[in-house]
Amino acid sequence: MSELLTKTEYSAIAKSIALPNKAFINGTFVDALSGQTMPTENPATGKILTEVASCNADDVNVAVANAKAVYEDGVWSKRSPSERKEAVLKLADLIEEHAVELAVLETLEAGKPIHECVKTDLPETISCIRWYAEAADKIYDQISPTGHDALATIRREAVGVVACVLPWNFPLMMLAWKLAPALMMGNSVIIKPAESTSMTTLKVAELAIEAGIPAGVFNVLPGLGPEVGEPLGMHDDVQVVSFTGSTATGRHFLRYSALSNLKRVVLECGGKSPSVILSDAKDLDSIAENVVNAALWNMGQNCTANSRIIIHKDLKTALTQKIIEQLDEWQTGDPLDPQHMLGSIINKEQYEKILRYIEIGKQEGAKLIYGGNALSINNGLFIEPAIFDNVTPEMTIAIEEIFGPVFGLIEAASDEEAIAIANDSCYGLQASLYTSDLKKAHLYAQQLQAGTVSVNCFSEGDVSTPFGGYKLSGFGGRDNSLMAFDQYSEVKTTWFDLT
C-alpha cells in the first residue's frame, strides 16, 4: 500500500474510479429525500467531479430513527467487545485493500498531494481503526471499595446515537479518530462529512457493510452545515456530537445542545500554533526541516500548523536562511503527481481568504521574504508558500488562523519572552519547542499553554496520546488515546445491598 505509483498510473485510476455520491442510511445508498444534490469539485482543476446527495432535516430524522432502533435492538450494541472487534478489524483490512482507490478519491476532492494520502493519511487511518478495535476488549471497568455488606460496580455503557461532524482537511483520518472509538463502545453513528469531501467517507461506509457491521450502525449524511449539522445538533435522540472544525461553528453546537437535550458536545477547533526556538537550540538544519513541515503540511490547512515561528534573536538570521533553503523541496503542483509536496487549496473561498491575509500582512508592515503568489496551474487553486519576516505579535497574521501555506517569523529578545509570545493567543492546540537544555525542555513545556507540546520536533503525538486543545481550541473531551472512549460512553454505578 505504501509504495507510490507514477503520476500516469494515478491519473488512470482517477479516470476509472467509481465516485460515491449518495447518502448512506440503514445500510443502503439513497438519494436525499428532497432530490437535492451539491457539486463536488476537484480544486486542482476546477472541474466538477460529481453531484453528491444534499441531505436536510428530513434525512436526518430518518437516519436518527433508524440508528436509534438498531441501537435499541442490540444487534451491535449488545455484542461483546471482542465480537465488535472482529468486524471492525475486518473493516480496517478492507480499507487497506482499497487504499489506493481511497487515496485517489481523497486527492481528487481535497486537492491533497497523493504522496501525503498514500504515505500518511491511509496508514494512520488504518492504524487508528485497528488500535481501537484491539483496545476495546482490554479495558476493565471498576468495583468500588464498599466493604463486605455491599457491592458497587462502575461500568461504561454506550450512549446510543452519536453524530460526528468532520472537517475537510483530513477526511479519512478524522473519520477514523471519531468513528472507531464510537463504534467500539457499541453506539450507532451518523457521520456528516464536510460538503467538499464526502466521497471517502461514503466508500468506507460501503466497506463497513462488507465487513459485517450491521445496517443502520454506520450512516453518512452529506450536505450543508445548516441543513444537516444543525438538525443533528438539535435532535433530541442524538446523545453526543463530536465536531472538528472552526471555533465559530463549534460555538453553534454548544448552543444547539443548550436548546435541545443537553447532549454532550466534544469540540476540536482552531489553532494558531507556535514553533518556539530558544537561545540554546542546536542543529538548525533539523529545526528548519521541522519548522517548514509543521507550517506547510497539507498546504498549511491544518489546525496544528505552526504558523508562528518565534525565534530567539541570536538565531534568527541563520535559521531564517535555512528555512528558505528547505522550501526548495516543497514543490507545488498537480496533487496526483507524487513528486509534489504541495497540492491545491480546498476551495475558492479558502483560496481567496489566504490571499487576503497575505495582503493584510504586507499592509500591516510585515516583510514578505518568500513566495505568496497565486499560481496558474491547470485552472486550479494553487498558492506558493509565503514567509513573512518582521512579524510582531499584534499583527493580524500573528493572531488569526489563516489555514493556508503562510507563516511568520517573530523575533524574541529572550527565552522568557518567546514563551510569553507563544502563550499570547486565544488558541492552545499544539506547540513545538526547540532547545538543547533538558531542564528548559521540561520547564517550558509545562509553561506552554497547549494540549500537545512536541520537543525538538513537530508532532501531534500518535493514536495512543490524547489530542485536543486549551482555550478556544477545544472543549469537552479528547480525540485519540483511551480517553476517547469516555466521550462516547456513559458511566453507570450499580449498588448491590448484600446485607
Image (cartoon, grey):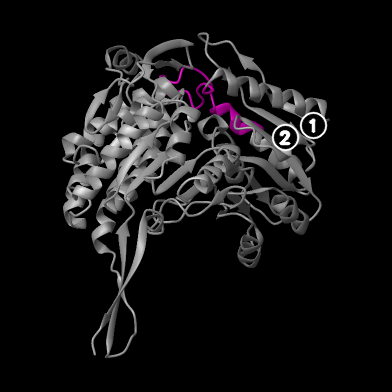
Count neighbours of disc 2 (C-alpha within 10 A) and say few if under 14, some if 14 to 19, many if 20 or more. Answer: many
* Quarter of the image that includes the C terminus: bottom left
- The percent coordinates of residue 10 (x first, y second) are 33, 18
Looking at the rendering, the stretch of residues picked out in magenta corresponds to 324-346
Would residue 177 be counted in the magenta stretch? no
Front-lying residue, 340 or 402: 402
Which one is in front, 157 or 101?
157
Cα separation, mark 2 vs mark 1, equals 9 Å
Disc on res. 88: none
- Does the magenta segment cover residue 330? yes
Query: Which image quarter: residue 288?
Result: top right
User: As shown in the figure, which amino acid type bears the numbered disc 2?
Assistant: Ile
Q: Amino acid at mark 1?
A: Ala
Quarter location, residue 162 = top left
Residue beneath the point at 32% across and 47% down: 180
Crowdedness of circle 1 by 10 Å Cα count: few (<14), some, many (20+)? many
Q: Is residue 342 above or below residue 465?
A: above
Q: Secondary structure at mark 1?
A: loop
Residue at label 2?
397
Vertical comparison of 329 with 488: above or below: above
Residue 253 percent location from the top left of the image: 52, 42
Circle 2/circle 1 CB separation < 8 Å: yes
Question: Toward which corner of the image does residue 23 lie, by quadrant?
Answer: top left
Q: Which mark is residue 366?
A: 1
Q: Nearer the viewer, residue 230 or 299?
A: 230
- Say whether residue 18 is left or right of residue 87: right
Is 275 located above or below residue 149 in the figure? above
Q: Position of residue 448 (x, y in %)?
A: 65, 57
Helix, strand or loop status at disc 2? helix
Q: Quadrant of the N terminus?
A: top left
